[in-house]
Image (cartoon, helix red, strand yellow):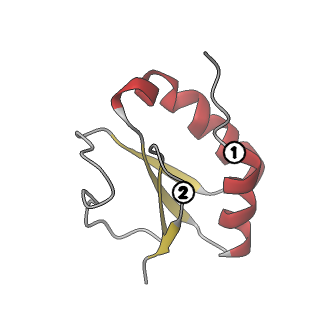
Amino acid sequence: MAYDLELDRVAETIQKEKAQTVCIQLPEGLKPKALEIVDELKSKTGAHVLIWAESCFGACDIPHLDVDLFIQWGHAPWITERRT
């Protein structure tokens, strides 16, 4: 099954927010695609994209990192949180 990860929309958000450092958090089933996602986002935005590889137990499981933008994929519509 193919998933629409809305990477164009994510890239637009990164650019709109002028985020230089971005952290992405993926559910376990998408972690094998993490490097592909990072490569695409880097090529579209020039941002430094980090992968949160720890477990993800939902939207309340947000790591506390010094990043400009945190993006989490899950089962509900995605949102972004600006970290400043």
Quarter of the C terminus within the rendering = bottom left
Q: Is residue 10 left or right of residue 56?
A: right
Q: Quadrant of residue 12?
A: bottom right
Residue at the (49%, 51%) spot, across then down: 76
Q: Which residue is mark 2?
A: 78
Image coords of residue 31 (percent x, y): 41, 28
Q: Secondary structure at mark 1?
A: loop
Q: Type of residue at label 1?
A: Glu
Considering only order in the chain, which callout, 2 or 1, is on the residue closer to the N terminus? 1
Calculate the distance from the C-alpha at mark 1 to the C-alpha at mark 2: 9 Å
Front-most of 65 and 13? 13
Q: Type of residue at label 2?
A: Trp
Mark 2 neighbour class, 10 Å CA radius: few under 14, some 14 to 19, many 20 or more: few
Q: Is residue 25 left or right of residue 36?
A: left
Image coords of residue 81 (percent x, y): 47, 72
- Pointer 1 with pointer 2, Cβ within 8 A: yes
